[in-house]
Amino acid sequence: MSSRWRGTLVYVGSLAVIGAAAFARYELSVAEEADAHHAAGHHAGHSMSPSAEGGGEGGKGSEKGSRGKASPAASPDGDGSGTTTDGGQDPAADQPAGEPAAEPEEVTITGAVIDTREGHVQVAVTFLGDEIVDINPLQAGHQDSPHGEQLNAEALPQLEEWALAAQSAQIDSVSGATYTSEGYKASLQSAIDLRG
Amino acid sequence: MTAVAPARHGVGREPRFRGGGRPGGRLRLAVRAAVPAGALAVTVFWFAGARSGTDPGTVVSGAGDLAGMLASYLVCALLVLISRAPWIERMFGLDHLVGWHRSLGAATVLLVVTHVVLVVVGSALWESTTAWEQVPRLLATQPDLWEALIGAGLFLVGGVTSARLIRRFLSYEAWLAAHLTLYVGIYLAFWHQLTGGTHFLGDPVARAVWILMYAAAGAALVTWRVIRPLWRLGRHVFRIEAVVPESPSTTSVWLKGRHVDELGVQGGQFFLVRFLAKGHLVTAHPYSISAVPGSGRLRFTVGALGDHSAAVAGLRPGTRVLLEGPFGRFTAARTPAQRVLLIAGGAGIGPIRALAEDLARDGRDVVVVHRARTAEELALAGELAPALGAAYIPLAGRRKALGHDPLAPGSLRRLVPDAAAREVFVCGPPGLIDTVIRSARRLRIPSTAVHYEELSLS
């Protein structure tokens, strides 16, 4: 005879399965990030050396260069990607990755890696004095989808244009690319904060 | 409620092999294992495609995605369970399938709610807002989410109205209406899975598999719940031949049709009967066969409960009838045992009588115990007594009047001395079934040798 609570039991069982699977995925992610961190740690060591290593420029599509911690006061995106992922692991990366290069006042600062629903977003910001002159997206999310790449191809230039015009991260989001926009702005803001 | 005759059948525990194997036992196990195996496959699929990330937003959202995918998979399983595919029904019995549909249905609705909550919370964690603020943001930015939300609402309505607690207060028609909106809900919620799920974007194979899963479930439903009955209608053309009162509380309905032998009806089975007449069109009643007399006839003996007595008695000969079935495993094929004890109460005499005929024809030793409140209520006694002679034991009279329960262990042993060596089939009101099960246990009849059928298709 069917038990009255069989359905609830099945539900509880599935919760257990979901919990276990999520936990396993979490552990896997921790392991992945630990690996990436070791790589980053090495590179952070190297980028201490002067000149040519304008850290940010070298870092396309990877987590090399410093991982700036998002400054709590300024960043709207307190999802804590900086804090949580780095938590307990790599301390090293609070410094601007670039040393002043040829022109004494030009410096490139790598912003924080922002975890969004659509992947990691990270920008490298080039300052000339106090002015933002260039923003280079190092990671832009949507890594696995062709649709996403197209989205980025449209959204990122737009965001850069707005940011350069506003000279800040207080800009609109591109509609249809909410997460990428939010990540972009947060990473930009973190670089601005680091600049001081 | 539409629980009419027979009030209840029930399938006991799975009968173990009794000298010789039951064919298909392994197949049944395989089919049973298929459902959790599918769930496991879905979980693995989720794992492979889940976003990497250790922040709470990702973890919670990911868990929410998995909950949603499992719920979606279960929806397809639910649809197959009530599709009434004959091969599944023969393996497990409609009552079992309906019971599982109920259980898994409850789990599915809970998983849908879990999915919504987790996804909203996870998304809020990402964007550092509260869950409450996050809902309109999600609705504005994600495709197909409004439809999905409405679909989830319909799921909730369908689930809540089917809960035993609520079901009691609803008429069958009201419950049915709420349950049918689930189809709409399933349709609405389907699209956001493909467009919003990170697992399906950019993975055409996964999309194809998901769509195929739903298409297969839908096809099973349409085939066996729409096409087959309609085809049957045309082929067999059942009409009411006569309506005959058997006792103050039971009425027999004789049907005549073509090619009845094609149906393969066995004694003890039931049909879902829909009379195509005003007032009867909406509901399909589970009625058991009480005789298969041949020459294209079928007889149902229906218990009259409340307003249904007037309804059935008022049916006119010539009315067309839509039959689905035969369903049920309450049959002679259930056991090879040579000695059988059949116990009937009230309108349960219908299937018992048909079963007795099959068993007797098969050369088995049959004893029928017939329990009723008064002697007039002993429907079909006129058929059973001459056929079985002393093996037909009528027990009329209320327990209070008699001073004891004739179905209590001691009394039962006195009436049927070798009861402990018999295989028992019981059909009647729930109280009677419980009494018999308890007595059987006291008489040391193994629980695998007691058969009853639970019949509640709401």
Image (cartoon, rainbow, N blue to C red):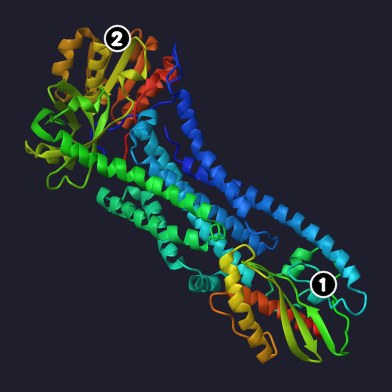
Out of B38 and B380, give the one closest to the viewer.
Answer: B38
Q: Which mark is residue B182?
A: none
Residue that badge 1 annotates: A66
**Position of residue B76 in the picture relative to residue A179 (left or right):** left
Out of B343 and B54, give the one closest to the viewer.
Answer: B54
* B263 versus B442 height, above or below: below
Q: Chain of mark 1?
A: A
**Which element carries disc 1, helix, strand or loop?**
loop
- For the point 20% across and 32% down, the residue is B303
Residue that badge 2 annotates: B364
For the residue marked with disc 2, what is the amino acid?
Arg
The x, y position of residue B143, in whole percent, is: 48, 68
Give the crowd class for mark 2: few <14, some 14-19, many >=20 residues within 10 Å: some
For the residue marked with disc 1, what is the amino acid?
Ser
Quadrant in the rendering for residue B265: top left
Task: Confirm whether residue B106 shows in the render.
Answer: no
Please tell me whether mark 2 or mark 1 is closer to you in this view.
Answer: 1
Q: Are marks 2 and 1 in contact (CB under 8 Å)?
A: no
**Position of residue B362 in the picture relative to residue A8 (left or right):** left
**Position of residue B306 in the picture relative to residue B441 (left or right):** left
Disc 2 to disc 1, how far (Cα)?
86 Å
- For the point 41% across and 65% down, the residue is B147
The x, y position of residue B135, in whole percent, is: 51, 70
Task: Confirm whether residue A30 shows in the render.
Answer: yes
* B331 versus B280 height, above or below: above
Quadrant in the rendering for residue B357: top left
